[in-house]
Amino acid sequence: MGAARCSRLLPPLLLLLLLLLLAPWALHVSGEPRSARRRWPVPYRRFDFRPKTDPYCQARYTFCPTGSAIPLMKEEDVIEVYRLQAPVWEFKYGDLLGHLKIMHDAVGFKSSLTGKNYTMEWYELFQLGNCTFPHLRPGMDAPFWCNQGAACFYEGIDDAHWKANGTLVLVTTISGTMFNEMAQWVKYDNETGIYYETWTVQASPDKKSTVWFDSYECSKFILRTYQKLADLGAVFKKIQTNYTSIILFSGEPIYLGNETSIFGPQGNKTLAAAIRDFYDPFKPHQSVREFFVDLFRIIDRVILNHQFYLFYNLEYWFLPMKSPYLKIIYEEVPLPVGSKASSGI
């Protein structure tokens, strides 16, 4: 299938943003299904290798088009580290998503010996919509996902892009040795953490509430990178740093199974049909009428019937949704300090 069939930009997410605006008028019901006690948040699963992507998965914009290998720095080099942040899709929509505090994060480096600049970021191979919602392909019972994410490293820092509507600020300096050790960690992190997870899911807006699932996206990669540098000895400046999270609110999630146990020959046909039906209105939209019809279907399922099916670690979970259902937050996460418990290889 061509790119127009399986490449998504933002329409499904725009549906959820409208849902967010309508959520305060939702009905409230009591009682939530409960699952057996588990470890929360569910640990993000790492893999031994990165699988090849299916040709069906196509991106409207090429992933990491000017990417290059991470260079080996001289030990005596002094490298400046920059915090980079800009609205998602800033190159296409300007500051539109910045008003909603939907931001993309990256990190920049500048070598004092060579004067060269570099940018490193982590994002979706096939755009955000494909990572957040599956495709329902004819002849396939299971939803089909194009949800890999990966690190991208390239020479140069696009000052105009990061400064126009976002942030470009020095946060620390490191040695060439520290940079090279970080590069080895990036290779490990990138080869084992391969799937993009859009949602953070938690019990309530209270900061101390239980987190059921944590997202795995661009900002989390930057936070892991900063922590790795701190563990290697980097000392960060005392400046405020904020990051975007898109949060779903639910009661305790219920584990449903994986693709085989639900959609396989011995699977649960009723559950399989319910999951496919849930994801159907999140498909790319061809007309204004279809957009609003599907919006009402989403409101019916998520708000009125308190239902959401989450795909995480290649497994499906049922979320008994509750008010305020969905929220976009832009909150401070302080720059790290070093610890003996490095998140390294």
Image: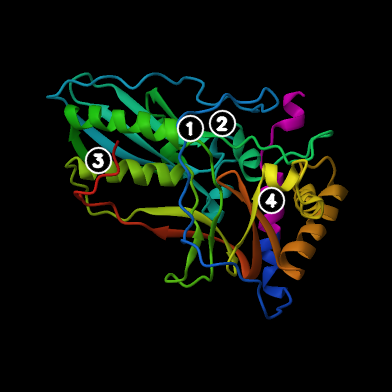
Residue 61 picture location, percent across and down? 61, 27
Residue 190 picture location, percent across and down? 42, 32
Tell me the CA gap for discs 2 and 3.
26 Å
Q: Tell whether label 2 touches label 1 (CB within 8 Å).
A: yes
Residue 182 picture location, percent across and down? 27, 33
Q: Nearer the viewer, mark 1 or mark 4?
A: 1
Q: Give, as a single range, the part of the protein colored magenta.
A: 1-18
Q: Amino acid under label 2?
A: Leu
Task: Give the mark, 1 or 4, whose residue is nearer the N terminus.
Answer: 4
Q: Which mark is residue 229?
A: 3
Tell me the CA gap for discs 1 and 3.
19 Å
Residue 126 picture location, percent across and down? 61, 32
Tell me the CA gap for discs 1 and 4.
24 Å
Looking at the rendered structure, the secondary structure element under dot 4 is helix
Tell me the CA gap for discs 1 and 2.
7 Å
Q: Which residue is mark 2?
A: 125
Q: Which residue is mark 4?
A: 14
Which of the 4 quarters of the picture holds residue 228?
A: top left
Q: Amino acid under label 4?
A: Leu
Q: Amino acid under label 1?
A: Ala
Q: Nearer the viewer, mark 4 or mark 3?
A: 3
Looking at the rendered structure, the secondary structure element under dot 1 is strand
Task: Give the mark, 2 or 4, whose residue is nearer the N terminus.
Answer: 4
Q: Amino acid under label 3?
A: Leu
Mark 4: few/some/many CA within 10 Å (<14, 14-19, 20+): some
Please, which residue is most extreme toward the right here?
289
Question: Please, is residue 18 above or below residue 232 in the view?
Answer: below
Q: Which residue is mark 1?
A: 150
Mark 1: few/some/many CA within 10 Å (<14, 14-19, 20+): many
Left or right: 47, with 307 as reference point: left
Q: Tell whether label 4 touches label 1 (CB within 8 Å).
A: no
Tell me the CA gap for discs 2 and 4.
20 Å
